[in-house]
Amino acid sequence: MKNDCLFCAIAAGEIPSSKVYEDELCYAFYDIAPQAPVHFLVIPKDHIGSVAEVDGQNSAVVAHIFEVIARVARELGLESYRVVSNIGEQAGQSVHHLHFHVLSGRDMTWPPG
Ligand code: 5GP
Ligand code: ZN
């Protein structure tokens, strides 16, 4: 757990959140400022700064997270959804702990803004 990391604290249950799913490797919770009718985040419990820090040592959790996204989306009955991860300031990353946004329930434009 990284000091002063908001999502490490959320994964540890030190800061309350609305849980969608949890297992030993990852935690999923609803975004506090939803950008779609369904908007949740999936994070590894161990601190990784962003996709840019994924490497041969820690990539297994990313595969696991995508399995979880598929399963949770199925359980929530989502037929269409978008998975997004922002990396760095220009792309809009505001929390520096790896997270995948799952957005669903409205029409979406492409390319994203
Ligand atoms: P980013 O901007 O880094 O791609 O995504 C960070 C996301 O975390 C944003 O969508 C923001 O609304 C969400 N967020 C920030 N602080 C909190 C919080 O304390 N609780 C929850 N549930 N979501 C948060
Ligand atoms: Zn963290």
Image: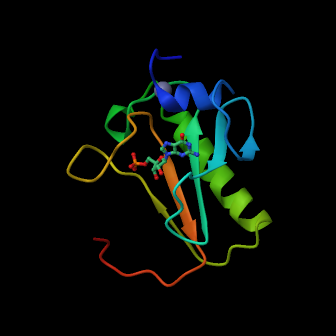
Q: Quadrant of residue 69?
A: bottom right
In the drawing, does residue 90 fall left or right of residue 28?
left
Return the x and y of residue 5 as percentages of the image width and height. Answer: 46, 25
Q: Residue at x 74, y 67 (%)?
A: 74
Q: Quadrant of residue 40?
A: bottom right
Residue 48 seen in this snapshot: yes
Q: Residue at x 44, y 80 (%)?
A: 108
**Count of numbered circles in the view:** 0
- Quadrant including the C terminus: bottom left
Q: Residue at x 46, y 14 (%)?
A: 3
Residue 45 seen in this snapshot: no
Return the x and y of residue 103 as percentages of the image width and height. Answer: 54, 66
Q: Residue furthest left?
A: 90
Q: Residue furthest bottom?
A: 107
Q: Is 108 drawn above or below residue 19 in the view shown? A: below
Which residue is nearer to you in this view: 87 or 30? 30
Q: Is 47 drawn above or below residue 68 in the view shown? A: above
Return the x and y of residue 109 as percentages of the image width and height. Answer: 38, 82
In the drawing, does residue 24 fall left or right of residue 40?
right
Q: Residue furthest right?
A: 75
Q: How is the image coloured?
A: rainbow
Which residue is nearer to you in this view: 39 or 16? 16
Return the x and y of residue 49 as percentages of the image width and height. Answer: 38, 31
Q: Quadrant of residue 95?
A: top left
Q: Is 108 drawn above or below residue 81 in the view shown? A: below
Q: Residue at x 54, y 70 (%)?
A: 36
Q: Is 21 drawn above or below residue 11 in the view shown? A: below
